[in-house]
Amino acid sequence: MLTRHEATAGILATAALAATPSAASAQDLKPIELPPPRDDGGKALTATLKLRRSTREYSDRPLSAQTLSDLLWTAFGVNRLASGDRTAPYWRHVMVMDIYVATADGVWLYEPQGHTLLPHSKDDIRAQTGLQDFVGTAPLNLIYVAHGERMTDISVEERRLYASVDEERWTAQSLVEPCSFQISSS
């Protein structure tokens, strides 16, 4: 049985792997232009929260391009084109987080300005992104990678704290859309 520390170290190693460019392994992959996110439909936030529940049943059915688009835009898309500001808050207006999308076909970096997925690796790393059995067969795993080196005006010790706060906000933000459109139960 892995200790919590060993498990965390393994997951962090996977995140580091996802963040390490691998042009040779991604050369066969093409960028994926996502459709525009939906700006209507779904349920009101209060109605969504009323229906919130936990489930231990997961589908291996791939997400549609539209659902993936909505999910990523909700997580950290650009919602103010003139300023480039995002749907989720971030630390001191410094972009310290990146979102990687891991699927059976490979790993992509979400590029919010163009609302595009950029190829990163053709390896299937889903099973390495978590501890539960289902992560290896989930149609999609989101990997949040914090770049402490972008936090230039604070100590190294504080970087982990602030990156963790941003990651928690992003995770919470990315849960709003699936609940609103109920993709987990359809």
Image (cartoon, rainbow, N blue to C red):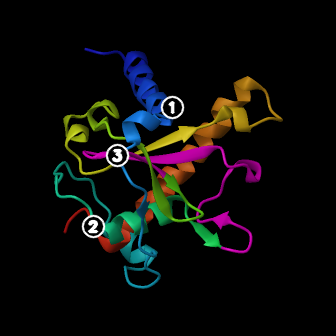
Identify the residue at image location x=34%, y=71%.
Answer: 66
> Which numbered circle lies on residue 20?
1
Instruction: Reply yes or no: does residue 102 show up in magenta.
Output: yes
Identify the residue at image location x=39%, y=20%.
Answer: 4
Q: Nearer the N terminus, badge 3 or badge 1?
A: 1
What amino acid is at disc 1? Thr
Q: In the rendered structure, which segment of residues is drawn in magenta?
A: 81-109
Q: Nearer the N terminus, badge 2 or badge 3?
A: 3
- Mark 3 Cα within 10 Å, few/some/many (few <14, many 20+)? few
Query: Dot 2: what SS?
Result: loop
Q: Nearer the viewer, residue 160 or 115?
A: 115
- Mark 1 Cα within 10 Å, few/some/many (few <14, many 20+)? few
List x then y, in percent, for residue 181. 33, 73
Q: Nearer the viewer, residue 143 or 42?
A: 143
The N terminus: image quadrant? top left
* Residue 50 visible in this rendered orientation of the protein: no
The residue carrying mark 2 is 64
Q: CA distance from mark 1 to mark 2?
A: 27 Å
Query: Dot 3: what SS?
Result: loop
Query: Dot 1: what SS?
Result: loop
> Is residue 153 shown left or right of residue 75?
right
What amino acid is at disc 3? Asp
> Which numbered circle lies on residue 28?
3
Instruction: Give the foreground label among 2 and 3.
Output: 3
Q: Nearer the viewer, residue 185 or 47?
A: 185
- The part of the image, by quadrant, that contains residue 121 is top left
List x then y, in percent, for residue 17. 45, 29
Q: Nearer the N terminus, badge 1 or badge 2?
A: 1
Identify the residue at image location x=46%, y=34%.
Answer: 22
List x then y, in percent, for residue 154. 80, 32
**Position of 98 relative to 50 (above/below):** above
